[in-house]
Image (cartoon, rainbow, N blue to C red):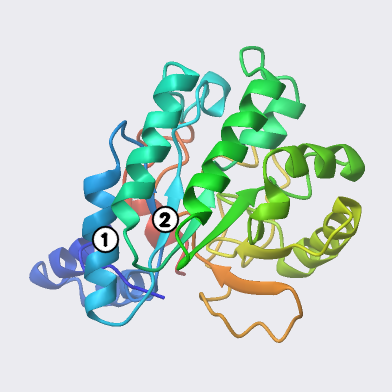
Amino acid sequence: MWTDPDTPAARQVAAYRDAGRFADAARIERIAREPQATWLTGANPGPEVRRLTTAATVVGRTPVLVAYHIPHRDCGAFSAGGADSSREYRAYVDSFAEGLGDRSAWVILEPDAVPQALAGCANAGLKERLGLLAYAVDRLKAHKNVRVYVDAGHPGWISDLPWLARALNKAGLPRADGFSLNVSNFHTTPTLLTYARRLAQATGHTPHFVFDTSRNGNGPYTGPDPWCNPPSRTLGPPPTLHTNTPSLDAHLWIKRPGESDGTCRGGPPAGVWWPEYALSLTP
Protein backbone atom coordinates (compact mmCIF):
# COMPACT_ATOMS: atom_id res chain seq x y z
CA MET A 1 0.00 0.00 0.00
CA TRP A 2 1.07 3.59 -0.61
CA THR A 3 2.57 5.81 2.09
CA ASP A 4 1.95 9.51 1.49
CA PRO A 5 5.26 11.30 2.13
CA ASP A 6 3.52 14.59 3.00
CA THR A 7 1.15 13.84 5.86
CA PRO A 8 0.82 15.99 9.00
CA ALA A 9 2.71 13.25 10.84
CA ALA A 10 5.60 13.45 8.37
CA ARG A 11 5.73 17.22 8.70
CA GLN A 12 5.68 16.87 12.49
CA VAL A 13 8.68 14.55 12.37
CA ALA A 14 10.62 17.18 10.42
CA ALA A 15 9.57 19.94 12.83
CA TYR A 16 10.62 17.95 15.89
CA ARG A 17 13.98 17.17 14.32
CA ASP A 18 14.53 20.84 13.49
CA ALA A 19 13.74 21.66 17.13
CA GLY A 20 16.17 19.05 18.42
CA ARG A 21 13.36 16.89 19.83
CA PHE A 22 14.79 13.70 18.40
CA ALA A 23 13.07 11.28 20.78
CA ASP A 24 9.66 12.78 19.97
CA ALA A 25 10.49 12.72 16.25
CA ALA A 26 11.25 9.01 16.51
CA ARG A 27 7.91 8.37 18.19
CA ILE A 28 5.92 10.23 15.52
CA GLU A 29 7.98 8.47 12.84
CA ARG A 30 6.21 5.27 13.94
CA ILE A 31 3.05 6.86 12.53
CA ALA A 32 4.48 8.69 9.54
CA ARG A 33 6.23 5.67 8.03
CA GLU A 34 3.06 3.59 7.69
CA PRO A 35 0.53 3.70 4.82
CA GLN A 36 -2.65 5.46 5.88
CA ALA A 37 -5.93 6.38 4.24
CA THR A 38 -6.78 9.75 2.77
CA TRP A 39 -10.29 11.05 3.45
CA LEU A 40 -12.08 12.78 0.56
CA THR A 41 -14.68 15.13 2.02
CA GLY A 42 -15.13 17.90 -0.56
CA ALA A 43 -17.85 18.16 -3.17
CA ASN A 44 -15.46 17.61 -6.10
CA PRO A 45 -12.91 14.96 -5.07
CA GLY A 46 -11.90 13.96 -8.60
CA PRO A 47 -8.74 16.09 -8.92
CA GLU A 48 -7.42 14.94 -5.55
CA VAL A 49 -8.27 11.30 -6.30
CA ARG A 50 -6.38 11.65 -9.57
CA ARG A 51 -3.37 13.21 -7.83
CA LEU A 52 -3.21 10.55 -5.12
CA THR A 53 -3.68 7.55 -7.40
CA THR A 54 -1.15 8.92 -9.85
CA ALA A 55 1.45 9.50 -7.12
CA ALA A 56 0.92 5.96 -5.84
CA THR A 57 1.08 4.43 -9.31
CA VAL A 58 4.42 6.10 -10.02
CA VAL A 59 6.01 4.10 -7.18
CA GLY A 60 4.05 0.91 -7.86
CA ARG A 61 1.75 1.21 -4.85
CA THR A 62 -1.98 1.39 -4.14
CA PRO A 63 -3.61 4.13 -2.05
CA VAL A 64 -6.42 3.69 0.47
CA LEU A 65 -9.10 6.34 -0.02
CA VAL A 66 -12.14 7.09 2.13
CA ALA A 67 -15.33 8.35 0.48
CA TYR A 68 -16.92 10.53 3.19
CA HIS A 69 -19.57 12.92 1.89
CA ILE A 70 -22.94 11.22 2.50
CA PRO A 71 -25.82 13.63 3.26
CA HIS A 72 -26.30 14.20 7.00
CA ARG A 73 -22.82 12.86 7.62
CA ASP A 74 -22.08 11.78 11.20
CA CYS A 75 -25.69 12.62 12.07
CA GLY A 76 -24.66 16.22 12.78
CA ALA A 77 -21.98 15.34 15.33
CA PHE A 78 -18.28 16.31 15.30
CA SER A 79 -17.77 15.26 11.66
CA ALA A 80 -21.01 16.83 10.43
CA GLY A 81 -21.29 17.88 6.81
CA GLY A 82 -21.59 16.04 3.55
CA ALA A 83 -23.64 16.65 0.44
CA ASP A 84 -26.80 18.74 0.66
CA SER A 85 -28.90 16.37 -1.42
CA SER A 86 -28.95 12.99 -3.13
CA ARG A 87 -28.23 14.69 -6.44
CA GLU A 88 -25.14 16.37 -5.01
CA TYR A 89 -23.94 13.08 -3.52
CA ARG A 90 -24.24 11.29 -6.83
CA ALA A 91 -22.22 14.13 -8.39
CA TYR A 92 -19.58 13.61 -5.68
CA VAL A 93 -19.42 9.89 -6.48
CA ASP A 94 -19.20 10.61 -10.21
CA SER A 95 -16.29 12.99 -9.62
CA PHE A 96 -14.56 10.44 -7.37
CA ALA A 97 -14.96 7.71 -9.98
CA GLU A 98 -13.71 9.90 -12.82
CA GLY A 99 -10.57 10.68 -10.82
CA LEU A 100 -9.68 7.00 -10.58
CA GLY A 101 -9.10 6.40 -14.26
CA ASP A 102 -7.57 2.95 -14.74
CA ARG A 103 -5.36 3.26 -11.65
CA SER A 104 -5.65 1.02 -8.59
CA ALA A 105 -7.17 2.08 -5.26
CA TRP A 106 -8.93 0.64 -2.25
CA VAL A 107 -12.00 2.66 -1.25
CA ILE A 108 -13.60 2.60 2.20
CA LEU A 109 -17.17 3.70 1.56
CA GLU A 110 -18.77 6.12 4.02
CA PRO A 111 -17.68 5.18 7.56
CA ASP A 112 -20.63 4.83 9.95
CA ALA A 113 -23.26 5.61 7.29
CA VAL A 114 -25.15 2.31 7.52
CA PRO A 115 -25.07 1.73 11.29
CA GLN A 116 -25.95 5.37 12.01
CA ALA A 117 -29.02 5.12 9.82
CA LEU A 118 -30.04 1.89 11.55
CA ALA A 119 -29.47 3.48 14.96
CA GLY A 120 -32.02 6.17 14.18
CA CYS A 121 -30.18 9.20 12.78
CA ALA A 122 -33.13 11.58 12.49
CA ASN A 123 -32.45 13.06 9.06
CA ALA A 124 -30.89 10.05 7.35
CA GLY A 125 -33.68 8.24 5.53
CA LEU A 126 -32.60 4.61 5.46
CA LYS A 127 -33.95 3.73 2.00
CA GLU A 128 -32.43 6.84 0.41
CA ARG A 129 -29.07 6.35 2.11
CA LEU A 130 -28.77 2.70 1.17
CA GLY A 131 -29.66 3.58 -2.41
CA LEU A 132 -26.92 6.21 -2.53
CA LEU A 133 -24.37 3.74 -1.19
CA ALA A 134 -25.43 1.16 -3.77
CA TYR A 135 -24.99 3.80 -6.47
CA ALA A 136 -21.49 4.50 -5.17
CA VAL A 137 -20.56 0.80 -5.16
CA ASP A 138 -21.69 0.34 -8.75
CA ARG A 139 -20.04 3.54 -9.97
CA LEU A 140 -16.70 2.78 -8.29
CA LYS A 141 -16.65 -0.93 -9.14
CA ALA A 142 -17.01 -0.04 -12.81
CA HIS A 143 -13.26 0.59 -12.53
CA LYS A 144 -11.61 -2.81 -12.69
CA ASN A 145 -8.59 -1.91 -10.53
CA VAL A 146 -10.62 -0.60 -7.60
CA ARG A 147 -11.65 -2.46 -4.47
CA VAL A 148 -14.63 -1.15 -2.47
CA TYR A 149 -15.47 -1.94 1.15
CA VAL A 150 -18.83 -0.77 2.52
CA ASP A 151 -18.43 0.33 6.12
CA ALA A 152 -20.27 -1.71 8.75
CA GLY A 153 -19.39 0.12 11.99
CA HIS A 154 -17.88 -1.81 14.88
CA PRO A 155 -18.76 -4.65 17.28
CA GLY A 156 -20.01 -2.30 19.99
CA TRP A 157 -22.76 -0.80 17.87
CA ILE A 158 -25.32 -2.92 15.98
CA SER A 159 -25.87 -6.25 17.72
CA ASP A 160 -28.70 -7.45 15.45
CA LEU A 161 -26.44 -8.83 12.74
CA PRO A 162 -29.18 -10.08 10.37
CA TRP A 163 -30.64 -6.53 10.40
CA LEU A 164 -27.24 -5.01 9.67
CA ALA A 165 -26.54 -7.62 6.98
CA ARG A 166 -29.81 -6.86 5.17
CA ALA A 167 -28.98 -3.15 5.16
CA LEU A 168 -25.46 -3.79 3.87
CA ASN A 169 -26.82 -5.99 1.09
CA LYS A 170 -29.19 -3.19 0.05
CA ALA A 171 -26.22 -0.81 0.13
CA GLY A 172 -24.51 -2.83 -2.60
CA LEU A 173 -22.37 -5.19 -0.54
CA PRO A 174 -22.90 -8.18 -2.88
CA ARG A 175 -21.28 -6.16 -5.69
CA ALA A 176 -18.51 -4.71 -3.51
CA ASP A 177 -15.38 -6.51 -2.33
CA GLY A 178 -16.53 -6.64 1.27
CA PHE A 179 -17.04 -4.50 4.36
CA SER A 180 -14.85 -2.52 6.73
CA LEU A 181 -14.94 -2.53 10.53
CA ASN A 182 -13.60 -0.41 13.38
CA VAL A 183 -12.96 2.79 11.40
CA SER A 184 -11.83 5.43 13.92
CA ASN A 185 -12.53 2.98 16.72
CA PHE A 186 -10.59 0.84 19.17
CA HIS A 187 -11.88 -2.74 19.31
CA THR A 188 -9.22 -5.43 19.43
CA THR A 189 -8.42 -7.50 16.39
CA PRO A 190 -9.71 -10.81 17.87
CA THR A 191 -13.02 -9.12 18.75
CA LEU A 192 -13.26 -7.74 15.22
CA LEU A 193 -12.59 -11.12 13.68
CA THR A 194 -15.35 -12.84 15.65
CA TYR A 195 -17.85 -10.11 14.73
CA ALA A 196 -16.77 -10.04 11.08
CA ARG A 197 -17.23 -13.77 10.63
CA ARG A 198 -20.71 -13.67 12.15
CA LEU A 199 -21.70 -10.66 10.04
CA ALA A 200 -20.34 -12.22 6.85
CA GLN A 201 -22.38 -15.36 7.52
CA ALA A 202 -25.51 -13.26 8.11
CA THR A 203 -25.21 -11.64 4.68
CA GLY A 204 -25.89 -14.95 2.96
CA HIS A 205 -22.84 -14.76 0.74
CA THR A 206 -19.07 -14.61 1.26
CA PRO A 207 -17.89 -11.01 1.61
CA HIS A 208 -14.32 -10.29 2.59
CA PHE A 209 -13.48 -7.61 5.16
CA VAL A 210 -10.80 -5.19 6.34
CA PHE A 211 -10.10 -3.83 9.83
CA ASP A 212 -8.92 -0.42 10.98
CA THR A 213 -6.16 -1.27 13.45
CA SER A 214 -4.68 2.21 13.70
CA ARG A 215 -5.44 2.74 17.40
CA ASN A 216 -6.61 -0.59 18.79
CA GLY A 217 -3.42 -1.59 20.61
CA ASN A 218 -5.03 -1.27 24.05
CA GLY A 219 -8.59 -2.04 23.01
CA PRO A 220 -11.57 0.22 23.73
CA TYR A 221 -11.71 2.76 26.56
CA THR A 222 -14.19 1.90 29.30
CA GLY A 223 -14.87 5.45 30.52
CA PRO A 224 -17.32 8.05 29.17
CA ASP A 225 -17.32 8.93 25.45
CA PRO A 226 -15.04 6.00 24.58
CA TRP A 227 -15.01 6.94 20.88
CA CYS A 228 -13.72 10.49 21.21
CA ASN A 229 -9.98 11.02 21.81
CA PRO A 230 -9.93 8.47 24.65
CA PRO A 231 -6.84 8.48 26.86
CA SER A 232 -4.28 5.71 27.19
CA ARG A 233 -4.80 4.18 23.75
CA THR A 234 -1.91 3.00 21.58
CA LEU A 235 -1.16 2.17 17.96
CA GLY A 236 -2.44 -1.20 16.79
CA PRO A 237 -0.94 -3.71 14.38
CA PRO A 238 0.68 -1.98 11.40
CA PRO A 239 -1.01 -2.12 8.01
CA THR A 240 -0.49 -5.38 6.18
CA LEU A 241 -2.02 -7.50 3.44
CA HIS A 242 -0.60 -10.65 5.06
CA THR A 243 -3.20 -11.47 7.70
CA ASN A 244 -2.96 -15.28 7.57
CA THR A 245 -6.74 -15.26 7.95
CA PRO A 246 -9.14 -16.26 5.16
CA SER A 247 -11.47 -13.44 4.09
CA LEU A 248 -9.53 -10.82 6.10
CA ASP A 249 -7.96 -8.86 3.25
CA ALA A 250 -5.94 -6.40 5.33
CA HIS A 251 -5.21 -4.55 8.49
CA LEU A 252 -5.37 -0.89 7.48
CA TRP A 253 -4.80 2.44 9.19
CA ILE A 254 -7.96 4.15 7.98
CA LYS A 255 -8.18 6.72 10.76
CA ARG A 256 -4.86 8.56 10.77
CA PRO A 257 -3.37 8.22 14.27
CA GLY A 258 -2.88 11.65 15.80
CA GLU A 259 -5.79 13.30 14.01
CA SER A 260 -8.53 14.37 16.41
CA ASP A 261 -11.91 12.67 16.74
CA GLY A 262 -13.49 16.04 17.57
CA THR A 263 -13.60 18.86 20.08
CA CYS A 264 -13.63 16.68 23.17
CA ARG A 265 -10.97 16.16 25.85
CA GLY A 266 -9.25 19.32 24.68
CA GLY A 267 -8.95 18.23 21.07
CA PRO A 268 -9.17 20.35 17.92
CA PRO A 269 -11.95 19.78 15.34
CA ALA A 270 -12.35 16.31 13.88
CA GLY A 271 -9.63 15.38 11.43
CA VAL A 272 -7.16 18.04 12.57
CA TRP A 273 -3.64 16.91 13.49
CA TRP A 274 -3.04 16.98 17.27
CA PRO A 275 0.63 16.30 18.07
CA GLU A 276 0.11 15.86 21.81
CA TYR A 277 -2.43 13.11 21.21
CA ALA A 278 -0.18 11.52 18.59
CA LEU A 279 2.59 11.30 21.18
CA SER A 280 0.20 9.70 23.65
CA LEU A 281 -0.43 6.91 21.11
CA THR A 282 3.28 6.12 20.91
CA PRO A 283 4.49 5.73 24.53
The spot of residue 273 in percent (x, y) is 31, 48
The spot of residue 169 in percent (x, y) is 76, 44
Q: Are marks 1 and 2 in contact (CB under 8 Å)?
A: yes
Work out which quarter of the rendered image holds the N terminus and state it: bottom left
Looking at the rendered structure, the secondary structure element under dot 1 is: helix
- In this view of the protein, which residue sits in the foreground, 262 or 264? 262
- Give the residue number, with chain letter if any, for mark 2: 65
Q: Is residue 22 left or right of residue 183?
A: left
- In this view of the protein, which residue sits in the foreground, 242 or 278? 242
Image quadrant in which you'd find residue 53: bottom left
Looking at the rendered structure, the secondary structure element under dot 2 is: strand
The spot of residue 230 in percent (x, y) is 57, 46
Seen at 10% across and 67% down, the residue is: 19
The spot of residue 94 in percent (x, y) is 38, 39
Residue 52 image label? 1
Q: Tell me the amino acid under the disc marked 2.
A: Leu
Q: Tell me the amino acid under the disc marked 1.
A: Leu
10 Å neighbourhood of mark 1: few (<14), some, or many (≥20)? many
Work out whether mark 1 precedes mark 2 in sequence or the reverse, and give the earlier one.
1
